[in-house]
Amino acid sequence: MQYQQGSFPIVGRQEIADGIYDFKIQCPEMAEQAKAGQFVHIRCPGVTLRRPISICQIDRAAGTLRLVFEVKGEGTRNLAQLRVGDEMDVMGPLGNGFDLRKTAGKAVFVGGGIGVPPMVEAAAAYGAKAAAVLGFRDKSRVILEEDMKALGCDVTVCTDDGSYGRKGLVTDAVKELLMEGDVNAIYACGPMVMLEALATLAKEYGVRCQVSLEERMGCGVGACLVCACKTKTKDGEENYSHVCKNGPVFDAQEVVFHG
Amino acid sequence: MADLRVNIAGVTLKNPVITASGCFGFGREYEDLYPLSKLGGVSLKGMTYQKRLGNPPPRIAETPSGMLNSVGLQNPGVESFIENDLPYLKTQDTVLIANAAGSTVEDYCRLVERLSETEIDMIELNISCPNVKEGGVAFGVSCEGAAGMVKAVRKYCKKPLMVKLSPNVTDIVSIAKAVESEGADAVSLINTLLGMRIDIHSRRPVLKNNVGGMSGPAVFPIAVRMVWQVANALSIPVVGMGGIDKWEDAVEMMMAGAAAVQVGAAMFWDPWAPVKIVEGLEHYLEEEKIEKVSDIVGTVRPWA
């Protein structure tokens, strides 16, 4: 792991859905190091602890990282108040990222709600060989669909209430893709129930599946051990791993979902 | 150049800033930012004789100017530490303080005995962890428990022994005196204060352990007060901690009577905090034309 910490200027800022912000920060060295699935740890004005935010896109040529986050509380609300030209105190890149080894077939990138952002950079490596399945509560929450299409992905959007795209769960759409065959890997980020359902599907179809987890975090680098998630080894031995250092990306079969 | 060196129980630290146990892992996590040799010492993640899984998550909750944690002493056990972490730490040119915990007196004794065979510099006896069901703070909240533990461990301890005290007590001075009388070489304080937060939407405690230890700048005045009271009552060195966030806090804590300080939660918002505190102390001493940092220890002039 090689990370840095410093203040970096905000060079882009947009509200892309109600309460969901799309920031770009100028941080060339961090952008150079970053991998899909990693995160940055941001000091938000007015609160004590940093907030982990996944990397949505990496532009090494421009030296920028794109961060898409949802306002969930005081920290992210204050963060969203920052403007282009302001500086952000950022640690990163942190965590292990996705293992995006290319395989012969297709890869499916599944995002649920605010779990969608890290899927953009992950899918970029696969381009037209990527299928994206994105799930949202309703039409007003849909984000990053056009960005995924621009990468050449075959995009399916699902909403809980059917107000946009197909009605229903992402797992139904993923199952159809698996039944068609030619899928070799699933990459996912979103609510735990979604990830658990995908892990089960992946096992059933014998497909490699990586999931990106979230947990309340402290240091962000593996020193304080607060962001625990239960994992198991191949022999079934259970342990607490840590989202910041051992993750945020885990092999879905290692995760104990009701730990 | 001002002399930043301090001596704690016969161990010389190049400066009085130590990273606090539980906030700095076994030292590797911050090496991307700065070498450990910049620090006076590192108090390592609390360890037990055998591996411990720790408590279920969430293990952290934010508070105004602070945080709660309920890690519950997750650690790989002393043998894993000796095999996997100590060889690296030995090469880092900083004082190594092993934070030792357990569930029973026997646990503590065999852990301290094992650590005494290694090249660590000092043992910090953790009788103040509020996050474990057995042991931990249970030994640290009564004079009898604390004295009994120190007496038992002393027989096996071949290293300088520092006892980390809990603030969750009525009279911390009497407990400090009890451990001093049983042969503690130093005391460190304060461990975290027991606290709780509730999510008003789910009506559930934020921490899965329901309660956890509070740290951060919010607890700093309590820590200063306790360090001051304990330092006035003891003749062994006191290492002060609790909410130290900047060099001014370190000076304040030392004036209250701390021979050295530990920096913990501050690292979570500013990972450079301990290094900045060392630099700030050095600058302060030069500005004030104070020759040695130890000259400020206990120099508060209380009102009559």
Image (cartoon, grey):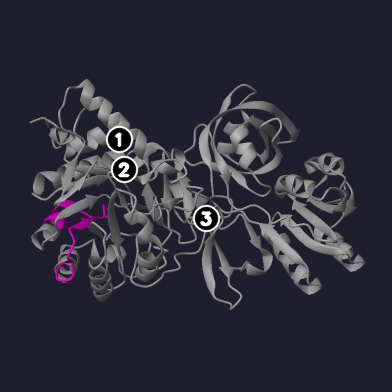
Q: Position of residue A132 (x, y in %)?
A: 83, 52
In this picture, residue B108 sits left or right of residue A174: left
Mark 1, residue position: B278
Asked which secondary structure carries label 2, the reply is loop
Q: For this rendering, which residue is in front, B78 or B150?
A: B78
Left or right of A175: which side holds A101? Answer: left
Considering the numbered disc 1 on the image, is that residue within a helix, a strand or a loop? Answer: helix
Label 3 CA crowd tier, 10 Å (few <14, some 14–19, many 20+) = many
Residue beneath disc 3: A227
For the residues bearing labels 2 and 1, Cβ distance under 8 angstroms: yes
Q: What kind of residue is marked 2?
A: Leu
Q: Is residue A72 left or right of residue A148?
A: left
Respond whether the residues carrying marks 2 and 3 are from the same subunit. no
Distance from Cα at disc 2 to Cα at disc 3: 26 Å
Q: Which residue is mark 2?
A: B39
Residues in magenta, as a range: B154-177
**Picture residue at 85% right of the left edge, 61% below the top:** A105
